[in-house]
Image (cartoon, rainbow, N blue to C red):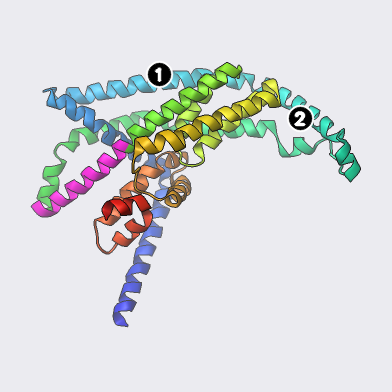
Amino acid sequence: MAQDTKKAGRILINLAAFVIIVAGMKAAQNLLVPFILSAFLAILFATPMAWLQSKRVPKVVAVVLVILVILAIGSIFGGLIGTSLVEFTRAVPRYEARLRTQQAGLVGWLQGLTLLQALGVEVADQLLFQYVDASKLFSAFGTLVTSLGQVLTNGALILLTMIFILLEMSGFPAKMQAAFGEAEATLARSDLAEIASSIRRYVALKTVISLATGVGVAIWLAILGVDFPVLWGLLAFLLNFIPNIGSFIAAIPAVLLAFIQYGWGNALLAALGYLVVNITMANLVEPRVMGRGVGLSTLVVFISLVFWGWVLGPIGMLISVPLTVIFRIALSTDESTRWIAVLLGSERSLEAEA
């Protein structure tokens, strides 16, 4: 009985500690997000840096080359997104006027339906204007893009932190050995190596799949004649990193714009294009490319999306899967918490371990 009471007490203490840590992370969101992104970038670019050093490139020069590559990629993406957003912002008033015209036509069509008249259903003139506010829809899209774009305002801090992490990375094993001893340091290095490998594999494959998704969406919207296909392709690329709901969110502004420009026909075709591209990638390409995936159940992936989005904002949604993978691997290293890691895992991960 005393042992059970002690075990229950430990569980309550761990839960209390978890709540305090989460509350602290949420409170320090603005400070924490840049450092988390710096760590992720350092993990991703550690491999090319190690390759450069294997070719006898000095460490400092290797870091400089990696930073130049990151700046080049960021400049290309920033230029494309910035130009498209400026043009889109200028066109918003015109789109709002067109949407109101489309809404008025739809209300008139509903009012003229014989079936509704026979049933005594009255369609108010302001029905759709009350529930579908064009300005709110476009402002919601702008808020999402602005939230993601805030990362660029912290770009200097992120890059500077990443540089220091990359410079310190080679000496980290020696520090761990001096701090914890040979046996524990070796075990910790293997866990860190597994975490880094899982993150690199997930991000690399997800980037390729998201890029294919964005290109497919942009080409289809360009064929339909929807304005700013590059912007919607970039949005589909970025939001595809958000599990389950990212692709759905990315489709909303493009389908709405297709409706504003051409009416229901092209809007349905645009939605069909998103559906075909995402079903192809999610159900045919991704399972074959990702293999066992990240070892997380579908339910856990969705819950982690909601949880990390609440704690860290939109960026937390983008990196929710890698963060959960880190926690799962960390929990699996201790016998007292291994059961939590098992619950977080998928059926395939259990089969692999068996």
Amino acid type shown at disc 2: Gln
Q: Dot 2 lies on which element? A: helix
Label whose residue precedes the other's in the sequence (2 or 1): 1
Vertical order, 60 against 323 (above or below): above
113 left or right of 195 in image? right
Q: Badges 2 and 1: C-beta atoms under 8 Å apart?
A: no
Residue at 51%, 19% in the rendered image: 219
Residue 23 disc label = none
121 left or right of 8 in image? right
Q: Can you give x and y, in whole percent of width and height, for residue 112 in the image?
A: 87, 33
Residue 76 disc label = 1
Q: Dot 1 lies on which element? A: helix
Nearer to us in this view, 335 or 21: 335
Check disc 2 and report the residue beneath it: 103
Q: Furthest residue to the bottom?
A: 1
3 left or right of 239 in image? left
Question: Magenta stretch: residue 186 in it?
Answer: yes
Residue at 77%, 25% in the rendered image: 101
Nearer to us in this view, 257 or 153: 257
Indicate the quadrant where residue 281 lies.
Answer: top left
Location of the C terminus by quadrant is bottom left
* Magenta highlight range: 181-201
